[in-house]
Amino acid sequence: MLRGDLGGSDVKGAGRWVLEEGKVEEFLRKLDEVIRRLDEIEKALSVLSELGLLPELLSILAGGSQIYSSQLRLIRRALVAEQVLRRLPRGDEISRHIIETLAEGGPMNISELTRAVRARRGRASRRIIRERLQRLLGMGLVVEVEGHGRKFDLPTSLGGQGLGTKAQKAE
């Protein structure tokens, strides 16, 4: 499923792990199942803690599961971002920066995205960011999520919902 790209430094993607395209959806499903199970463990440990039944060793386990859960969510975001980036039209640098910004920062509104893209590339306008977001929404490469005002995020998978929040806008 995963293969190392051990090419020289002049090879695009050298030194990175590459997930074969046909295995991405299977890997994402398995990752979702692991995240779901970790969430259940965290809830159970939280209840035990509230009842005062959580010894010190289990408390350490609870902290560890939260760390792994957050790391798995970050890996999932990166995998979805890679899928989305592959579907972008060639030469669309601003859309690429928008996707990378959402992958790293989670859900953002147009003003937040404009500031983040400006920090990455040196310039950006709200009008252009808004136009690109509308195009990306139409292509299904970003989704609108609930939040204060209009917020955008990556889909959980292409054709899915946003990654950043549990409460999503009904479409």
Image (tube, rainbow, N blue to C red):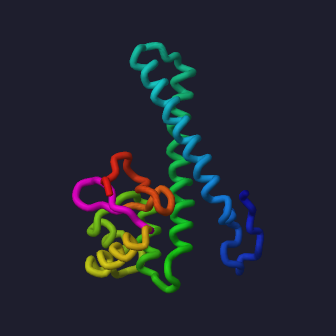
Q: Residue at x 26, y 61 (%)?
A: 150
- Which quarter of the rendering shows the N terminus? bottom right
Answer whether residue 160 is magenta in the image. Answer: no
Q: Looking at this view, name the residue that lies furthest to the left.
A: 149
- Magenta extent: 141-152
Q: Residue at x 36, y 58 (%)?
A: 107
Q: Is 161 on the left or on the right of 151, as rendered?
A: right
- Which quarter of the rendering shows the C terminus? bottom left
Q: Hey, which quadrant is residue 95 in on the image?
A: bottom left
Count the marks. 0
- The residue lying toward the viewer, choosing from 46 and 116, is 46
* Residue 113 image offset from top left, x and y in percent: 33, 68
* Residue 60 image offset from top left, x and y in percent: 54, 27
Q: Looking at this view, name the residue that lies furthest to the front.
A: 171
- The residue lying toward the viewer, choosing from 99 and 158, is 158
Q: Residue at x 45, y 57 (%)?
A: 160
In the image, is residue 57 above or below residue 30?
above
Q: Hey, which quadrant is residue 2 in on the image?
A: bottom right
Q: Hey, which quadrant is residue 22 in on the image?
A: bottom right
In the image, is residue 110 above or below residue 149?
below
Q: Residue at x 74, y 68 (%)?
A: 5
* Residue 144 image offset from top left, x and y in percent: 33, 61
* Residue 70 image offset from top left, x and y in percent: 50, 45
Q: Is residue 64 visible?
A: yes
Q: Is 145 on the left or on the right of 36, as rendered?
A: left
Q: Is residue 18 visible?
A: no
